[in-house]
Amino acid sequence: MISKINFPIDELSSMKKYPHELFYIGNLELLKRKKISIIGTRRPNSYTKEFTYKLASKFSNAGICIVSGAAMGVDALAHQGAKSNNTIAVVANGLDIRYPSINKNLIIDIEKNGLVLSAYKEKEKARNYTFVHRNEIVVALSEFLIVTEADLNSGSLTSVNYALRMGKKVYTLPHRINESLGTQELLKKGLIEAIYDIDEFLEKVSGIKTTFLDDEVLNFCKNYPTYEEALRKFSNKIFEYELEGKIKIENGKLIVV
């Protein structure tokens, strides 16, 4: 059910202009959690996909809520890595519209378990200016911003400008030459910082130590099962662990990394 937020959200006071209205579906308790924003290109490369998911998953497992914009690509991966019960999706349209349609099931899942926010009334469609406004809200809600990949003139760079104006730190992944040119340029200028080790980064910004805990899935994979055997036994867990970089496939068999 779509409801209106009738109290101020302190973090949004850093915006140039506080939204006239805010609507939501889901769990408002997530607003009370420590939050970070993860955004980026709608067409991430395989390296960005892997580490966006891994970043979101590790921060979420540490109890930190992941905020993003429910768009294709990096946004969707950030929500998926966080799991739907620990993520906030900020959308650029009325909450009766689930956009983009390719993420419809993801948005429904977040509505049920997490929180979806919008500054727009029902039936309001996304436009250029609503995306820009959405981006500012995504940035304002969090302690800092991670842009995992962005090209030159990307909309994600507008979010970086918002973050810097608000005095927030901005981080990115280190990319190869000629990849993610937007973030590469910002790194050259010293405006943002690169993440070279996720566990060290998580400990640095949150004070939380990460520990690798053995579990049933990894114990099973230590015996080099076939991919099909692992899928039959653990279903979606295998896909999740593969994205997180805990296991890999070699010659049709699973290996613990």
Image: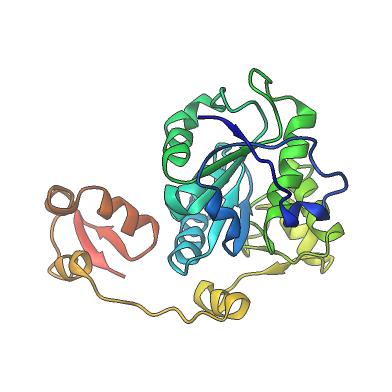
- Image coordinates of residue 132 in percent, x first then y, are 77, 37
Of residue 156 and residue 18, the one placed in the foreground of this image is: 18
Q: Which residue lies furthest to the top in this view?
A: 123
Q: Which residue lies furthest to the front in this view?
A: 6
- Image coordinates of residue 124 in percent, x first then y, are 69, 20
Please tell me whether residue 136 is drawn above or below residue 92 in the rendered image. below
- Image coordinates of residue 131 in percent, x first then y, are 73, 34
Of residue 195 and residue 46, the one placed in the foreground of this image is: 195
- Horizontal placement of 89 versus 124: left or right? left
Of residue 193 and residue 16, the one placed in the foreground of this image is: 16
**If the image is split into quadrants, where does the C terminus sit?**
bottom left
- Horizontal placement of 60 versus 158: left or right? left
Residue 151 visible from this viewpoint: no
- Image coordinates of residue 175 in percent, x first then y, are 62, 61
Residue at (64% x, 17% y) in the render: 123
Residue at (42% x, 32% y) in the render: 105
Hey, which quadrant is residue 213 in on the image? Answer: bottom left
Residue at (66% x, 27% y) in the render: 93
Residue 16 visible from this viewpoint: yes
Of residue 86 and residue 174, the one placed in the foreground of this image is: 86
Please tell me whether residue 147 is drawn above or below residue 96 in the rendered image. below
Say how many tags the image has: 0
The colour scheme is rainbow
- Horizontal placement of 168 versus 110: left or right? right
Hey, which quadrant is residue 220 in on the image? Answer: bottom left
